[in-house]
Amino acid sequence: MTSSFYLNLSKDLSLILDDADEYNVIIKVGENENTKEFRAHSVILRARSPYFKGALSSYWVTKKDDMIMFNKPNIKPDIFNMILRYIYTGELNLTEQLSEDILRLLIASDELLLEELVKFLQEYLIEQRKNWVHENFVFVLNTVCSLTSCKILQDHCFETICFDPELLLASDSFLKLDKDILYDLLERDDLLIQEIVVWDHLIKWGIEQTPGLGSLNCDRNKWNNEDYGALKETLNEFIPLIRFTEISLDDFNYKIKTYKDIIPNQIYEEIERFYYKITKDTLPTIFNISPRIGKLDSKIIKPKLAKIIINWIDKKDSFTLRYKFNLIYRGSIDGISTESFKNKCKGQVESLVLVKVKQINKIFGGYSSIGFNSIGDSLLRVYNGNLRFYHSSDNFVFSFENDEDTQDMKISRVKNHNKAIYDYHTTGFDFGFNSLFMYHDQCLYANNDDFNYESNINTNVIHDIEEIETFIVTKQ
C-alpha cells in the first residue's frame, strides 16, 4: 500500500519558496517601473516546467557570480508570483483576482508550457467567470487566437457567437476581430445567422481593415478602381466562405452585385448562373459549400457529422438543402427506456435517432422519413397480429467511429421498402425488424438477419446504450 502526504509536501515547498534558501536563479519580470526580482531553484523550475527545462539549459542562461540570471519582461510581477507559487506548491487562489488577470495568467501559463494550469484556467473562466467571458469574448478570442493549447476557451467563445451572433454583430467589436478568428468563424456550419447578414458584416469588416478606406473613405460612390482592388485583396480569402446559394435574388441584386469587382470572376460567374439559371446545371461547383445547419443541440455528434447525415438524407454528395434538427428526446434527461422513447418519439414525422454506446467510442443512428412508432395505417404494409411493418424508401441506418471522425463511417439503406420500420411494443425503435433496434430498455442490436436493409453496419455484439437522442427533421 502506498500512502500520499501531499499537504505537508506542499507546505514544505512553500517554505522553500518564501525563504528562497540556497536559491540559484534570479528571475526579473515586468518592465519599466513595474518590475520585481524573484529567487528560485533551477531544479524545481526545470522539473515542473518544460519551458524552464530548456530555458535554463547551459545554452541559454546568463550567469553572474554562479547565479543564473533570467528575464521575463512580458509577464507582470503579480502574475508571475501566482505561477511561481503554483510551480512550487501546486496551489492557486483566484477568488480575489480580476478576470483580466486570470486571462493574463492563462497566456503566461501557455508560454511556460504549464499544460495542467492552462487547462484549469480555461475551465475556470468558462465556469466561474462566464458572464465576463460572454461580455468580452472578442477580447478573449483575440487574446488566445494564436494559442493552440487554448482550444477549450476558443471553442466556448465560438459556440457563444454561433448560438447568438447578435452579441458580436451588434457591437463595434466585430470590426476589431482578428482575421484568423473571422476566418474560423465563417467556416463554421453552426453559425446561426442569415447569410446576407454575414455578407453585410464581412464587407464592413473589410472596409475597416483596408488602408485608405474605413472612416477616411467611407463613401463608396467616391471609390476608384484602386479602392475596390484594395478591398478585394483584404477579403480575397473570405469570399469563398460565403454561402451565396442561401442569399435571395433581391439581396443578390441590391447587395452582392454592387461589390462585383471584389469577387473573383469564376465565382461571380457561377453566382450569376445560379441566380438567373442560365444553364440547367445551376448548382455551383467552385464555391459549392453546403448551407449552415445552425446550432445542433447534440451531446453525441458534432456539426461535421450532421452535414454528412443531411447529405445522406438528400442522397447527394455535395450541395444540400437546409435542415433543422429539433431535439425531442434525450435519454440522460428523459430516461433511457423503450417506454420513454415511445412516449417522446411517436407519430408519422421525419426523425433522426442517435445512439452512443458504452465501452467503445462508437455511434449508431438511423433516419426514418416516417417516424418510429404510432405511425398510423396509411403506410402500413404488413400486419399480422403484433407484426406491424411500415413502408419507406428513404430510411437508412449508419455508424461512426466517434463524434467527429469521417474516416470509417458506414451507411445501410433500406432494401425492402415495405418493411422499413417495425412497430412493436417491446422495442423503442426498430429499423427493418432487426437491422438496428432498441430492445430491453438499454440494449442496442444491429444484426440485420432479415436483410431488410443493406448489410454494412451489421454486428453480433449487443451494445449497452450510454446516451440516445431523437430529433424531428424539417426542411427549411
Image (cartoon, rainbow, N blue to C red):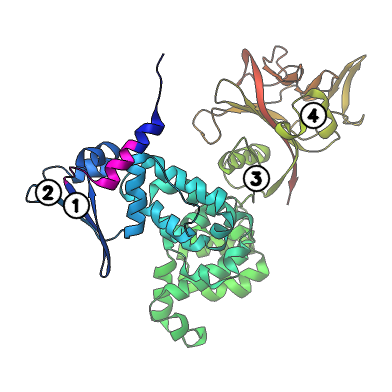
Answer whether residue 267 is visible to the viewer in this image: no
Amino acid type, mark 4: Phe
- Which numbered disc, 1 or 4, marks the residue closer to the eye? 1
* Residue at mark 3 to residue at mark 4: CA–CA distance: 20 Å
Query: Farthest residue in the bottom direction?
Result: 222
What secondary structure is marked by label 1?
Answer: strand
* Residue position for label 3: 296
For the record, the magenta segment spans: 12-24
Residue 341's disc number: 4
Q: Which of marks 4 and 2 is nearer the N terminus?
A: 2
Question: Badge 3: few (under 14), some or many (20 or more) residues near its Cα, within 10 Å?
Answer: some
* Residue at mark 1 to residue at mark 2: CA–CA distance: 7 Å
What secondary structure is marked by label 3?
Answer: loop
Question: For the stretch drawn in magenta, what is the main secondary structure?
Answer: helix
Task: Please tell me whether residue 143 belongs to the stretch shown in magenta.
Answer: no
* Residue at mark 4 to residue at mark 2: CA–CA distance: 70 Å
**Residue at x 69%, y 47% (from the top left corner):** 323
* Residue position for label 2: 67
**Residue at x 26%, y 66% (from the top left corner):** 31
Image: 408 above or below 34: above
User: x and y percent of residue 331 in the render?
Assistant: 72, 31
* Residue position for label 1: 26
